[in-house]
Image: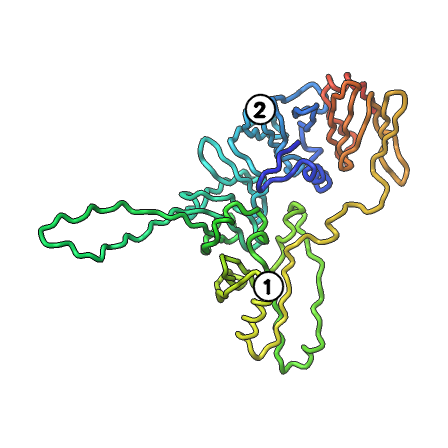
Amino acid sequence: MRKLLNFNISLGFGLILALFVSNSVWAQQKYYVYQYNKTYGLTDLSGSDLIEGDFTDVEDDFTDSNFVVFENKAQKYVLINLKTGKQEVFDTFKPFSFYAEDEYFSFVEKNGKYYYRGRETEKIISVPKELSNNYFSQIGMINKNYLFAISTEEVKEPVKKSKTPVKKGAIPPPTLPPSYKEKTYVYLFKNQKSLPFIKKIEIDSDHRFSSSEANSLFTFFEVRKTPKTDKKGEVSYVTLQDRTYNPDLMPWHFAYESPFDIATLTVGKKLIICDSTFKVLKTVPKSEDNDARDLVKTYLTAAYPNDDINVSFGNFSPSVSMGGLGGTRKSFWDVKEKDGFSEISYLKDEQYVPYLKAKGKAEIHSNNIIELTDEKENSLYIYLDRAHLDVLPIPQKYSTAFQITKL
């Protein structure tokens, strides 16, 4: 199974992503992913042209029109062009770091160098100079306007001068080497491919390994101000709008289009209140009994005495509708077993149409991956696309072993 890495995705969630792929992508490929037991590979449609390489994990699949990324036994990451078969090896490859302007960028390491690689254009973005000399987490996304990263710096401490004057003729004490102290910061950048730096804010060191989600560090609020003299404002309501989605974005980047008016950050026993550009408005004391929203409202009420203030949480959490994909509709795939064989059918016009027959037991994963298991517990995973069921990418040796027949 795929490893769950920081700024990465699990295999189970990765499989669901197949539902979001452009139909044209599948038809343009020459090579397709397959899995046999715990190893992965690529096959062409004939099943005779294979790309194998001790691939033990798939890090990035079904979400890119051109590439797949495998991890091999040497713990290297092998990026393969699905149209040409060309391979490139990386020491680190973490997809979906951030979406800037019109494409995703992956965080990669190769030959000791770190950078970001465009998924479609292969554009290279260097690590920002503000982070290049520090221990940093890879860049994460707040929304379409801002990116962030957490970094630990070694800051030079000022040298304390001795209060005792050196007597005339005496040998002065030796000069002490400078001392350094580690400090942790959150760095803020504009969400552009040039990564313009905005500012850094010192934070607690325990945030050093925070998750890639911005709301694990910040709390975002929307603010509504109504003049107290505005009688209409006393009876007006805030209408909640459904969040709009960019179809090119992964489902977990649901906050891409989410605006905010206030962002807060807890540092020790203080709450830092920032505006929508991350300009610090005020730092106030905070205890465990203090609610950040109440503190924000108290600050804004004092700052705008002629307005009624309403503070609500920003739209930075998954929508309830994201919890399911399809409700109670009939499953697209249907499996029937008989005499040691499994017959798999697909749904068309509310009727199941026979698709393929194979020896052994069959199980459907996320509606588009078929797992076949033989009597020796060997498993073959067939990756399919509903819109292109004529495409059945299976290596010949496994098609023979499982006696697969297309119906």
Q: Amino acid at mark 1?
A: Asp
- Tell whether 343 sits left or right of 25: right
Q: Which residue is mark 2?
A: 73
Q: Please give the name of the residue rendered at 76% of the width and 37% of the height, measured from the top-left corner.
A: 366
Which residue occupies the foreground of this view, 271 or 104? 271
Q: Is residue 342 left or right of residue 15?
A: right
Q: Position of residue 294 (x, y in %)?
A: 60, 67
User: Observer-nearest residue: 305 or 124?
Assistant: 305
Name above or below for residue 276 compared with residue 376: below
Q: Which mark is residue 291?
A: 1
Q: Could you say whether the residue bearing mark 2 is in a helix, strand or loop?
A: loop
Closer to the camera, 182 or 138?
Answer: 182
Give the farthest residue toward the left.
169
Total marks shown come to 2
Q: Position of residue 348 (x, y in %)?
A: 87, 38
Crowd class of label 2 (few under 14; some 14 to 19; many from 20; radius 10 Å) = few
Residue 51 image-quadrant placement? top right
Query: Where residue 138 appears, x then y in whole percent?
Result: 51, 43
